[in-house]
Amino acid sequence: MDKVYKHQHTEKNWYSLWEEKGYFTPVINPEKKPFAIIMPPPNANGSLHIGHAAFLTIEDVMIRYHRMVSEVTLWLPGADHAGILTQVVFERKLEKEENKSRFDLGREEFIRRCMEFTLKNKEVMENQMRAIGASCDWSRKSFTLDPKFNKPINATFKKLYEDGFLYRDLRMINWCPRCATALSDLEVIYKEKKDPLYFIKYGPLTLATVRPETKFGDTALAVNPKDKRYLNFIGREIEAEGLLGKMKFKVIADPAVDPKFGTGVVKVTPAHDPDDFAMGLRHNLEVRQVIGFDGKLNEKTGPFKGLTVREARIKTASDMEKKGLIVKKDTEYIHNIAICERCQTVIEPMVSLQWFIRTKSLAEMAIKAVQKGEIRFIPKSFVKNYNIWMENIRDWCISRQLWWGHQIPVWYCGKKNLSDLQLTMNPELKKIKNEGCGEIIVADEKPRTCPKCQKKNLIRDPDTLDTWFSSGQWPYTTLNFDQENVSDYEYFYPTTVMETGYEILFFWVARMIMLGLYSTGKVPFKIVYLHGLVRDALGTKMSKSKGNVIDPLTVIDKYGADSLRMALVYGTSPGSDVKLSEKKIEAMRNFGNKIWNMARFIKMNIEFFEKNSKKFTPDQKYIPSDNDDKNLLKNLDKLIKLVTDNMNSYRFAIVSEKLYNFLWHEMADKYMEQVKDRLRNNDWSALNTLYVTFISSIKMLHPIMPFITEEINKQLTGEEKPLIISPWPK
RNA sequence: GGACCCGUAGCUCAGUCCGGUUAGAGCGUUCGGUUUACAUCCGAAAGGUCAGAGGUUCGAUUCCUCUCGGGUCCACCA
């Protein structure tokens, strides 16, 4: 054995051996207890970062432990097409490298190229997972856009439609003019911005707004019903001079108006503001769209047509100023604006026809399942967050004007039911002749003819499904729920643990619970284990621009995967963020070297014993008479119980700490020093106690540090059977 | 506006759910050490009114209330 442990020599070999021998693939046995984790599929649009390394480590620790306690263990790996995120990444690349947009390629070619790009990333990622040591079952690996998922996903859509959970409606959506897509509420972030607040004259009234360019879409003025200043205006129609001549507005009273804001009067623009849209519904106001999906003003704005929102804001303001319509300008006004989470573009609220899921009753089922204890959260404090979100859930907009994703399984007879938005986003559709009866057909496969008029020119809804709609079904679609061979589903579903980041509790976990209960009648998993974000040593979020990124592959290369894994487990707790530094990884590398040298010491003493006495055959059950020996074995028993208990309760930080302390400070620093004299005198009992205790400890360390423990075990015992399939110490 | 989490050694964090011997670890600091593994090491030490105040209790870092400080999520800003 080398004086210093060299991970470079061992890690790749061990991984190949495990994989080739098929240890990652479970053998289904109805007599035994199953343990299943469906891996949260990483986005296949880049390489793995340290956050991936963290969750892969935690899941691998669970999997390796349960495999050792002889449960039938499935860890199903995957990759996510990630909808808008991947489309944006790929579009940027396309623009940069070829100066082309997706429209230049056309839908079919774009999807083909994007798939090529994604599959390439996916392969790189899979090898990175191997480097981390993830013992997942590659024979079952899944990709969210695998064609095999089309059928079950479409079937869920169809079922939801038939059960009345789906509807298509004109709704206010968050429109990102850059991504040219509607975003869910959760994909929008808010940012503080300073914008001028204009006080504009509307006939006898004055109101304050930061969006003068939307005034062409105003269809009412509103005040708070309790605001005494304006009581006698309520219900009246006023006439006001505007940029396009005289206009008439009804003054309505609505409690949503804040009397303290501006003058207490607001303009109501139902087509371009979420609150105004809601107010419009309450008061039956006209929805007059003046901004197009291209982010430019339309023909209803006369001379302003064709200007972007930003340009129009400046021009309308200055024109009104010239006409004397602007009473006052507050240039220090700070407000929050909605921006696209992915590309940071300012969101344009727009009305558009979209598919929605009625979520209320789905959420009620999901709340009940957690209340009844069918799903347990670790840490449990997240149940509160979950309940609050579920209780206040809004209907879920699941259509996306993207090309990259699962296309919505709806066909229209003719163009009547396609929205302007869809025709805008898909130039190919414009060429199609408009004939047909307008029937809407929801089916899991393309129908040959329209069931109503028998015509054959069915047009598929060009929109794709929100990526969370398909990944929300991941726990059962990956188990081939809808296929002939249902044994995986029967045996492993509901899965045991869903381990994922708390930041996607609502995006993903909540949706999986709702859709899982709806589609299968069962919860998709019994335990939700939430991990935190990996931050740098100072607690700052890691990002490339800040230069504080720890790249997992670089540190694996330098310190070994075991060191990184131990560093990601030690001193961390579920639900809270992990602060990681290179120093910590180095410290764990030192620990690895420590146990390596303990093994070297033991091996040396075995050789010494065999030279001077006889062949050393360890006896697991030997009860020594020496007090030091007895004491160590007693402490080992305690350790086994402690580690097992903490493994079972998912407290891996305690597991790592206890093993670390026992091996280094109990065994190496104390016991090994105590017995040096006895070993010199060929004391078999001392050697046996040392050996037996060390091997048991190494086994318990294997789930966290799989490579070095395998290598030590092989060097020391010469056994063929690797630790990965060894029984857990008792 | 609603809610959640965190505040423990110089730094980064465990421990608190289920109150009870000297409150732990890693890194850092100081002093000393090369006899059968390991300097990626060993021994020793310094360093904490467990954010603050009050309450419950024989006893509170732990439970309850409030305050201060830090962070996050959700809603909303016309």
Image (cartoon, coloured by chain):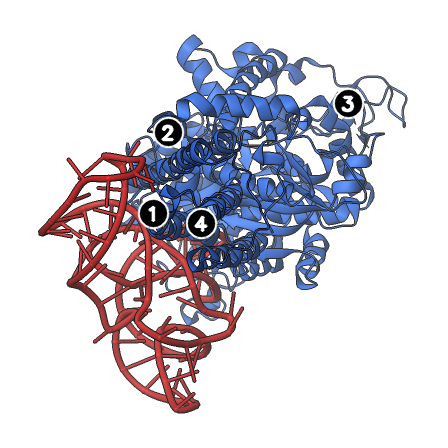
Chain colours: A blue, B red
> Judging from the image, what secondary structure is the residue with disc 1 in?
helix
Residue carrying label 2: A5
Name the residue located 90 percent from the left edge and 27 percent from the top edge.
A451
Residue carrying label 4: A659
Quadrant of the drawing holding the N terminus of chain A: top left
Q: Chain of mark 2?
A: A
Question: In the image, what residue type sits under mark 4?
Answer: Leu
Question: In the image, what residue type sits under mark 2?
Answer: Tyr
> Judging from the image, what secondary structure is the residue with disc 3 in?
loop
Query: Cα distance, mark 4 to mark 2?
Result: 19 Å
Query: Cα distance, mark 1 to mark 3?
Result: 92 Å
Bin the neighbour count of mark 4 within 10 Å (Cα to Cα): few under 14, some 14-19, many 20 and up. many
Q: In this orientation, which residue lies closer to the viewer: A141 or A183?
A: A141
Q: Are marks 1 and 3 in contact (CB under 8 Å)?
A: no
Residue carrying label 3: A414
Q: Where is residue A631, by image quadrant?
A: bottom left
Marks 1, 3: nearer the viewer:
1
| Earlier sequence position, callout 4 versus callout 2 | 2
